[in-house]
């Protein structure tokens, strides 16, 4: 029952956030009135971010108070905090984008709750890959359909935000295992092998599409909305709708510089996160 309930909640939450992405964006950007006071929620992005950050700190403090070996968990959270700080400096155009961490943290936590009630060390990587895949599908949906009229590129920055959000959710989940008195198990897991195989197939397919020129970066300014364009006798999917968007620095509306990650850079960062954090979490579990 727990497994079914957790999966239903995780997938329902993911579908709702994907479907109502624009609705939420419009709501938070519009003028609201409460008790005669008018305001725009987006103007309080930093306050909202700090509030959820403080809530997370309280949860982490509670975890640490009940943890025998605190050092590994502290190292993991300090590393995550540093990465989020760098992301805010280099990749974000507005603090509101930090909502990705909360969104995919919740999804990853619910997936772990439903799939891994016995806290198996071998399944951490699979859970990070599954929740990251949901984030990738979310961004593809936005670029191709939801925000196709004004989306200029497939947002690899958000790929990273979603993946780090997943790491946060899983660290919160596995950092609490001792409260339940569960016995940690390390075993070969079919789910991990299956998910890694699917990723291998997906990356191989993408490489083949690049090689045979069905997938490419933009070479001209007039790529239509959604990135699909007929060139000669073939339909090509463009990852950007104008040249030099991916893999370059840009200026935001507030005149701050931000970097837009390209596909090769994303693969490198993705692999680093997928290797380092499952290993760190599994080492933490092994020492409890």
Image: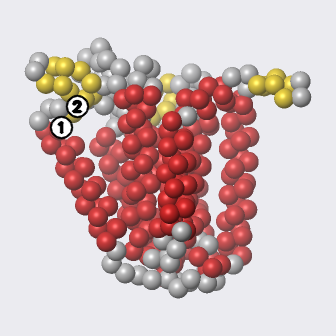
Relative to 147, residue 272 above or below: below
Instruction: Residue 263: name its quadrant.
Output: top left
Q: Residue at x 68, y 58 (%)?
A: 56
| Percent x, y of residue 145 | 40, 28
Q: Which residue is mark 2?
A: 216
Residue lying furthest right: 35
> Does 188 sit left or right of 90 as displayed?
left
Relative to 195, residue 154 above or below: above
Q: Secondary structure at mark 2?
A: strand
Label number found at residue 176 = none
Q: Which residue is mark 1?
A: 210
> Does 210 sit left or right of 78 as displayed?
left
| Percent x, y of residue 25 | 60, 29
Residue lying furthest top: 222
Q: Is residue 142 visible?
A: yes
Q: Residue at x 56, y 83 (%)?
A: 182
Q: Secondary structure at mark 1?
A: helix
């Amino acid at each position: 029952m727990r497994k079914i309930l957790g999966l239903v909640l995780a997938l329902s939450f993911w579908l709702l956030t994907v479907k109502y992405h624009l609705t939420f964006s419009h709501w938070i950007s519009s003028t609201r009135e409460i008790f005669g006071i008018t305001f725009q929620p987006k103007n309080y992005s930093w306050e909202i971010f700090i509030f959820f950050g403080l809530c997370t700190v309280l949860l982490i403090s509670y975890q640490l108070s009940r943890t025998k070996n605190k050092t590994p968990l502290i190292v993991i959270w300090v590393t995550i905090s540093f990465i989020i700080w760098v992301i805010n400096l280099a990749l974000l155009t507005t603090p509101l984008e930090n909502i990705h961490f909360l969104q995919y943290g919740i999804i990853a936590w619910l997936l772990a709750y439903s799939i891994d009630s016995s806290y198996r060390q071998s399944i951490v990587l699979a859970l990070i890959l599954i929740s990251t895949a949901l984030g990738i599908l979310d961004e593809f949906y936005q670029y191709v359909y939801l925000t196709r009229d004004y989306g200029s590129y497939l947002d690899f920055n958000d790929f990273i935000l979603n993946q780090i959000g997943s790491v946060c959710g899983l660290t919160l989940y596995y950092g609490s295992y001792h409260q339940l008195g569960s016995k940690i198990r390390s075993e070969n897991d079919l789910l991990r092998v299956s998910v890694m195989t699917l990723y291998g197939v997906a990356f191989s397919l993408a490489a083949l599409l690049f090689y045979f020129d069905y997938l490419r970066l933009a070479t001209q300014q007039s790529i239509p909305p959604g990135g699909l364009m007929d060139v000669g006798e073939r339909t090509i999917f463009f990852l950007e709708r104008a040249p030099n968007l991916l893999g370059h620095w840009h200026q935001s509306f507030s005149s701050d510089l931000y970097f837009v990650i390209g596909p090769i850079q994303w693969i490198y960062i993705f692999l680093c996160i997928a290797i380092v954090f499952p290993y760190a979490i599994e080492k933490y579990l092994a020492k409890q």
